[in-house]
Amino acid sequence: MAGDAFDFSVPPFDRLTDGERAKVRAVADIAYYRPQEKVIVAGEPVDFLYVVMKGLVAERQGDEVITVHGAGDSFGAMALIHGAEAADCEAQEETLLHLLPRQLILDLCRVNGRFERFFTHSVSERLAERANVESARGMAAFMVARVHEAYLHPPITVPASTTLRDAARLMKHHRATSLLVESPDGRIGVLSGSDLREAALIEEKPLTTEVGDCASFGTIMIDADEFLFNAQVLMTRHSIRRLPVVRDGHVIGVLELLDLLSYMSSHSHLVAVQIDRAGTLPELAQAAQALDPLLTGLHGSGVKIRYIAEMVSDLSRKMQRRLYGFLATPDLQQHSCLMVMGSEGRGEQIAKTDQDNALILSDEVDPDSLRSLCDQFTEAMISFGYPRCPGNMMVSNPEWCRTESQFRDEIFHWVMTPSERSFLNLAAFLDSEAVAGDPLLLHRLRAYLFDRLTDNAGFLANFARPALSFDTPIGFFHQLVLERGERKGTIDIKKGGIFPVVHGVRALALEKRLHTRNTFERIDGLVGERLFDTAFAADLTEALQFLMEMRLAARVQQNRLDANGSDNYVQAAHLTKLQHDGLRDSLRIVKTFKQLVAHHFKLGSF
Amino acid sequence: MLATFRQALARRRLRNPDYTFLFDPPPPDEAVCFDCETTGLDRKADSIVQIAAVRIKGRRVLTSQRLNLMVRPPAGMTAGVIKIHHLRQQDVADGLEPLEAMDRFLRFVGSRPLVGYYLEFDVAMVNRLIRPWLGIGLPQRQIEVSSLYYDYRTSRGGGIYTGNVDLRLSAIMEDLNLPRLKAHDAFNDAVMTALAYVKLKAR
């Protein structure tokens, strides 16, 4: 039909044959959206490929516009074809869209390779855009990753004559979600949890039924050297959730959709699963290795640093819990509490930072009897890539492996005889979080500490003072002030930026008896206490996030994810205009915050 | 009230019980936009050569649910009409018998409200065919897009708009910032009118 409503001159529709065009025409609808109306709501299923007929649609993640679609552009393909989570899409002006149903697009992809390639290709483009082009590391890595690089569940093969009950037991024992079933003629089938459920509960087959009758054979498999995204295309096309992976004709593992998707979004789930499954120290060490690529991948992926840090801290705690589980007997675990402090306790870890951990024991346990266990713990952590704490705040140090009463006396001592050392210890304790064992031990000590401290105004002022002890490198005219001497041309963002915020917020939170550890959560809590208004809290949060991001960027750039302190310095000459301005604004906010702290604790002229 | 009475009256006059579905409660939020191409503008003498309709549901113009029929006119077409809509004798020679086209049109519309641009003319052309056959004209509710547009234009600026309102379809489409499809094709006209309707209704 001439003067068609649908424009076939725009890619990828120019690649369609006449017959395929007729199909598109036959099923396309047109929808009208007013400005600010949502076309796609993030997280909701997407049923159409949208092609802009007239108007403008913005794709957003949070408040950030990722990309804008104008006439002829299509969107929704990622979610449609790849099952990815859709981003919010909102009409920016009055907009008319063609709606092409999911089934049509999938059919066209199947029969027309050039059409399909447009989407597989533009997926990587979109991803690159989303991740700031240059830093699409994680996503781009996904695009070139091979199947064998993803987490493959170990294959558990059973003969077809196995009963349903035994199969279920085996799955439980191995914490597996599926089994491979080998039939007498050598074919391999898959038995999933849902197959079991269907057979036993819905079809009410006796539990002695052989799994050969319930598994699905003729299973589609994938080669270990195949690209991961092809695995996903296969899964989507056949709506299956797991693929046996073969190499040289042998099944070497099972790829699950969940692992594949999480590999794509972060790899975090994968690390968590690995930690969870580790049965030996070397296995745990291997899981620990996976943390580094995770961090590199997440950097610049658009995920807020606050959440990256939370996730890394969480994984790291998980790892220590598992490690402690290996080393300590169940009885000891009940009578002790392993805790982490510092950035890890606050959930702000963005690298494998120095170990800051301690062990609290019930009074009836003798600390000296655990010396070798504590040494093993510290050594294992070092082998995982967590360096020793320069301040020796580690379980291997007898000062940090004590009974509850001994710690209580220590706390009393720290409060009564203020010194730099006792302030440091108190600060660490304030940020402490229980990781393994009985958390009540730590809880009681923290309650004691809060009781001792909060009514002591003089103490609080002294405790807060270090927040002001380093100059924030921003001058009178809001220009950045560079270091001199050995670190010439650099800016110390830790001393001048991050530390004052973290410590100032910690002191304020202590005064207000906020039990939260995380600096961002403390800031939120302080808004509730009317210490800040919401706008300032938002600024401070942004500033801290920006500084943390700069730090992670420095780390990734130097390709050092172990903390050696060099990431505290930013080379001013290497900053882009955007970073320069961001840094200047952040430091200005830090400076304002320091004034607030000084005023609040009456710390005199500043 | 009057509308209900008229419907009841029409229902009694309906000669063919196969078509009582025309009086069913319409599906919510749906409508049908339709347009005819004719041999001329005389509603007594000219006849329909093409009839096209498209369903509308909410904000969507369901171009996937369309009706586009060529109709064989009883008398030969004049050259002037050929120039307007590019339908030649041979194009319509394969067309359906008028009553068969009407049957398919009625089944496509069902009881949904009718939307159109100068709907009165199209309805009159259809009624001339179906009245002798069924005993009634189209009983559905009718929504005139040009009058929706007129209301929209005159209400803009606090209802003190005094100038003339250009009610040509092309002017309406332009003013509403809607895409212009190739005109004088019944289906494209129906789609354009449907777009204008969806947009005016969303306000």
Image: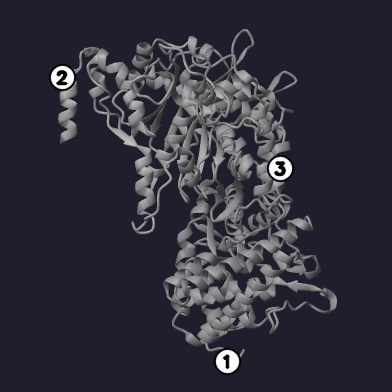
The quadrant in which the N terminus of chain A is found is: top right
The label on residue B58 is: none
| Mark in front: 3 vs 2 | 2
Looking at the image, residue A51 sits to the left or right of residue B129; the answer is right
Image coordinates for residue A500, horizontal then vertical, percent: 62, 76
Answer whether residue A42 is visible to the viewer in this image.
no
Q: Are marks 2 and 1 on the same chain?
A: no
Query: Circle 2 sits in a helix, a strand or a loop, which is it?
Result: helix
Q: Residue B179: image x %, image y %?
A: 53, 39
Q: Which residue is mark 1?
A: A604
Left or right of residue A144, residue B198 in this image = left
Among numbered discs 3 and 1, the one appearing first in the sequence: 3
Q: CA distance from mark 2 to mark 1?
A: 96 Å
- Mark 3 or mark 1, whichever is nearer to me: 3
Chain of the residue under the numbered disc 3 shown in the image: A
Chain letter of mark 1 equals A
Are discs 3 and 2 located on one and the same chain? Answer: no
